[in-house]
Image (spheres, rainbow, N blue to C red):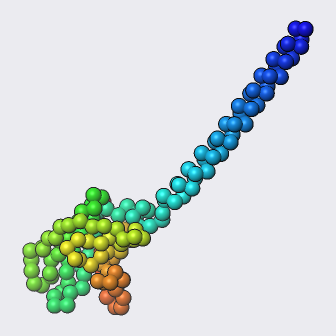
Amino acid sequence: MKKTIINTLCITLVFLITSCNSGKKKETQVIEEPQQEIEMEATGDNSMTSLDWDGVYEGELPCADCEGIKTVVTINSDKTYTIQETYLGKETTPIETKGTFEWDDQGQKIILSNDRNPFFVGENTLTLLDSDGNKNTGELESFYVLRKVMD
């Protein structure tokens, strides 16, 4: 009699454990799948998310009526910027412009306030774009690229 009661309790216990575990497996599967999808959608490979873009960039931009424009652009992580421009051969005092910027929809370009041309953000570079947001081409193409000098 004791053996029958013990056997019945053992079978019942095994049944309960098995049924509890199978329910947990189903729950875990349902929870894990949406998390993986969300993570994949949230990450993107672009300048905004993949590059260390904040810092100080320098270069000499082409100028139609002077020797060149020594340009220093500081891009801050709080989406503010400062641009110092010195017109070589004309003006010795830099002209300073400050403002805010936003990223374009693709996260590749920064759009500056104050109606300035946008910049393409590359690996340790800022490339001044034309008013339509395109890279300048031709002989002077390399002169539109500012190089990062400080983080």
Quadrant assignment for the C terminus: bottom left
Which of the 4 quarters of the picture holds residue 46?
bottom left
What residue is rendered at 69% in x and 40% in y? 25
Answer yes or no: is residue 95 visible: yes
Q: Residue at x 48, y 65 (%)?
A: 45
Is there any visible trace of residue 150 in the rendered image? no
The image shows residue 51, relative to residue 147, as above or below, that is above
**49 sits left or right of 71 in the view:** right
The vertical placement of 119 against 12, above or below, is: below
Q: x, y percentage for residue 129? A: 32, 80
Farthest residue in the top direction?
2
Closer to us: 85 or 119: 119
Q: Position of residue 118 (x, y in %)?
A: 30, 76
Can you give x and y, in whole percent of width and height, for residue 51 in the image? Answer: 40, 63
Considering depth in this image, is 89 or 123 the residue closer to the camera? 123
Q: Is residue 125 above or below residue 150?
A: below
**Drawn side of residue 36 relative to residue 21, left or right:** left
Dividing the picture into quadrants, the one containing residue 104 is bottom left
Q: How many marks?
A: 0
- Residue occupying the point 76% across, 31% down: 18
Q: Left of 134 or right of it: where is 72?
A: left
Please tell me which residue lies in front, 43 or 22: 22
Quadrant of the image for the N terminus? top right
The image shows residue 137 at horizontal and vertical percentages of: 36, 88
Question: At 84% across and 13% down in the image, what residue appears?
Answer: 6
